[in-house]
Amino acid sequence: MIMETDMPNRWASITVDCADPDRLAAFWGTLLDLPADPDPLPGWAGLARDRPPLPRINFQPVTEPKRAKVRIHLDVAVDDIDRGIAQVLELGGAATGERHDYDEGVVVVMADPEGNEFCLVEYY
């Protein structure tokens, strides 16, 4: 039961495990046009929440490599799917070859420089 004095749960951040936090922060910061945000934890990198209600994005260093498809991912809306794909490739990401065309738009599965999948979506 929620009491009137209780604060609602809030989405504060998303954290990406990675080998090179600075590299991934640069990739995602450029792709999403978000500034770097210094993080108090040694070795971590982050992107600022400069446009609320966007959450902070953290990049946490881990030693183990990514082994399988991620079970949660970001969808990045673009105005032009071909330009979006080109930007991801230019920034060091990769195409997975997976594309879905729907009546309402197109979804292309891409990967960041460490292989984390995400979708570019263009709505019609």
Image (cartoon, rainbow, N blue to C red):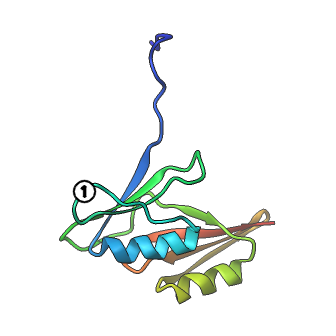
Q: Which residue is mark 1?
A: 41
Mark 1 residue crowding within 10 angstroms, few (<14) / some (14–19) / many (20+): few
Compared to 40, does 116 lie above or below? Answer: below
Q: Viewer-proximal residue, 39 or 32?
A: 39
Residue 63 position in % (x across, y down): 18, 71
Identify which residue is drawn at 41% across, 81% down: 113
- Element type where label 1 sits in the image: loop
Extreme left residue here? 63
Q: Could you tell whether 66 is left or right of 56 in the image?
A: left
Number of numbered markers = 1
Three-letter code for the amino acid on which mark 1 is drawn: Leu
Q: Quadrant of the N terminus?
A: top left
Q: Could you tell whether 28 is left or right of 114 in the image?
A: right
Residue 8 position in % (x across, y down): 48, 26
Q: Quadrant of residue 67?
A: bottom left
Residue 42 position in % (x across, y down): 22, 62
Residue 38 position in % (x across, y down): 36, 60
Q: Quadrant of residue 30?
A: bottom right
Q: Quadrant of the C terminus?
A: bottom right
